[in-house]
Amino acid sequence: MTNPQTAPRHDTLDNAGRRNLLRLGSGATLASLLAPGALWASGIEAANAGRQISYLSGFYKPTQVESTSLGLKVRGNIPAELSGRYFRNGHNPKAGAKPAFWFAGDGMVFGVRIRNGKAEWYRNRWVDTPALHGAPLFRPDRSIDFAASAAATSIVAHAGRILALQEVNFPYEMTPELETVGAYTFGGALKSNMTAHPKIDPQTGEMLFFGASPVPPHLVFHQVDRHGQLAHSEIIEGAGPSVMHDFMITKNYVIFFDTSVTFNPRASLPFPYAWNPKYQAKIGLLPRDRSKGPVRWIPMDPFYTFHQSNAWEDASGRIVVQGTQWDQAAWEHTSMWINSVAGHGQWPGKGMHMAQWTIDPVQATASVKVVDDLSTDFPTINAALLTSASRYTYAVAFPNTKLKQPALVKYDSRTGQRQVREFPSGQMPSEPNFAAAAGATGEDNGWILSLVSDLASQRGHLLILDAHDIRKPPVAVIDIPDWVSAGVHGAWISDKELAPS
Ligand SMILES: [Fe+2]
């Protein structure tokens, strides 16, 4: 692209950055920008009178029951070596709650315990946060309450701890049986919000993450060591008020996507973000070795990316990033669904495509290439390959001109081929999550797990597919005797991940 921009400085918590970071806790600027109650508007019922709200109906109809079922019925055979838990988070508001947009809905985690070839239990639990009981994001003094989280976006395990995440708040610790422990701040060290997409480096065991904010400081970077200690926090200069939902790491770099969807408190929609072609979109390269200088920002043409699945440095030192790219139409379709605008359609996503970015860290240039024509998001990989060259990516495809129903897709970046598993009408799969086979040597030697919401039976089931060929009949289908609302991100958490390090 064009000339690189180098941020003028980077603050650490040992200097002026501390003052800026402390401002995060006040949130006063943000609160003053938003109309009173805008985030939690109660007018949605009137606005939606006579029609269904997108994120509260169909596949997204919330369940109002927290249940526990033991000894689940299994069709097929669960691989005996799978020992762990499949968890999936999502927005599932309590009866009477009035979330003004999808992301404001209360978080519920749905889980299945698998051991010795059996599905021992199913549990679904709300993440028990102050927000679940009506606490607003802003306190009466207009300071932001990072603990008032919907905690509804993702769930991850690191250093033996399970965290439910939503990007504008602190993480919430959960037990392996899905009881809520409470807001987790790394012993009080965390002073910013935390993305729902931290990255765990399989080589070092570190967990890297960021907190993004619509008001300065817009971007704070954090490093947690393999033992779970928050070792470093730093304000990253040069980022703006965009929706920075995900990021990527390689062996030597952290990669930020400062995109064309930016905070707009004057937007007419409850979720106050809009496509902004006047904003200079850019990609940031931050050396992981923090003695090697500040972030470098590379200007890009207008774009948005919601999720990235992997990144690595190739033999020539260039950085390859894989993920989904969105254009303006894709963002605006999804924005209408998130805000339940009339005519939004049944599916949350349309028009986003698998893409590959190539970044030259020496020249500070970047280019992007769309590699597929399906409307795809929730891309995942075998997590052991994060920061290394990977061949396979798994994703959810939403109906578009190529597909009538939602599907799971497996991409082979070496051959350019894809496998598509289209679901029957009335079924919706969740993000595909990879579980490795014991002693696996091949990248796709393992299974894909995905939680399916089934409108006809008003129940759910957990699919276990052979990752070699996701089109084959399932290895196992675990029947869940209750309704499972469609949601957001899931995870396979093996027992090894919860063992003391
Ligand atoms: Fe996400």
Image (cartoon, grey):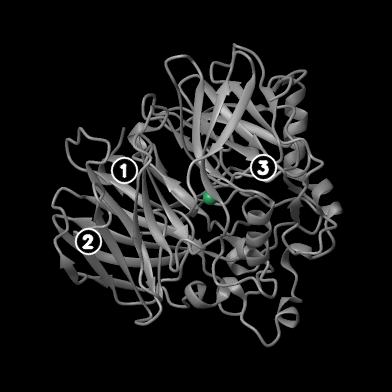
Task: State the CA–CA distance, disc 1 to disc 2.
Answer: 27 Å
**Which label sits on residue 474?**
2
Say few, some or many: other residues with alpha carbon within 10 Å of mark 1 (under 14 / 14 to 19 / 20 or more). some
Rendered image quadrant of residue 426: bottom left
The image shows residue 67 at horizontal and vertical percentages of 36, 74
**Which of the image's four quarters has the C terminus?**
top left
Tell me if I can see residue 197 in this picture.
no
Q: Which residue is mark 3?
A: 303
Q: Earlier in the sequence, mark 2 or mark 3?
A: 3
Q: Earlier in the sequence, mark 1 or mark 3?
A: 3
The image shows residue 183 at horizontal and vertical percentages of 54, 50
Residue shown at 50%/19% (left/top)?
252
Say few, some or many: other residues with alpha carbon within 10 Å of mark 2 (under 14 / 14 to 19 / 20 or more). some
Q: For this rendering, which residue is in front, 193 or 340?
A: 340
Secondary structure of residue under mark 3: loop
Q: For this rendering, which residue is in front, 231 or 209?
A: 209
Q: Which residue is mark 1?
A: 498
Amino acid residing under circle 1? Leu
Task: State the CA–CA distance, disc 2 to disc 3.
Answer: 37 Å
Rendered image quadrant of residue 18: top right
Amino acid residing under circle 2? Pro
Say few, some or many: other residues with alpha carbon within 10 Å of mark 3 (under 14 / 14 to 19 / 20 or more). many
Q: Height in image: 34 above or below 295?
A: below
Instruction: Mark 2 vs mark 3: give the one in front.
Output: 3
Horizontal side, residue 336 vs residue 200: left or right: right
The image shows residue 96 at horizontal and vertical percentages of 61, 79
Residue shown at 30%/61% (left/top)?
112
> Disc 2 vs disc 3: Cβ atoms closer than 8 Å?
no
Amino acid residing under circle 3? Phe
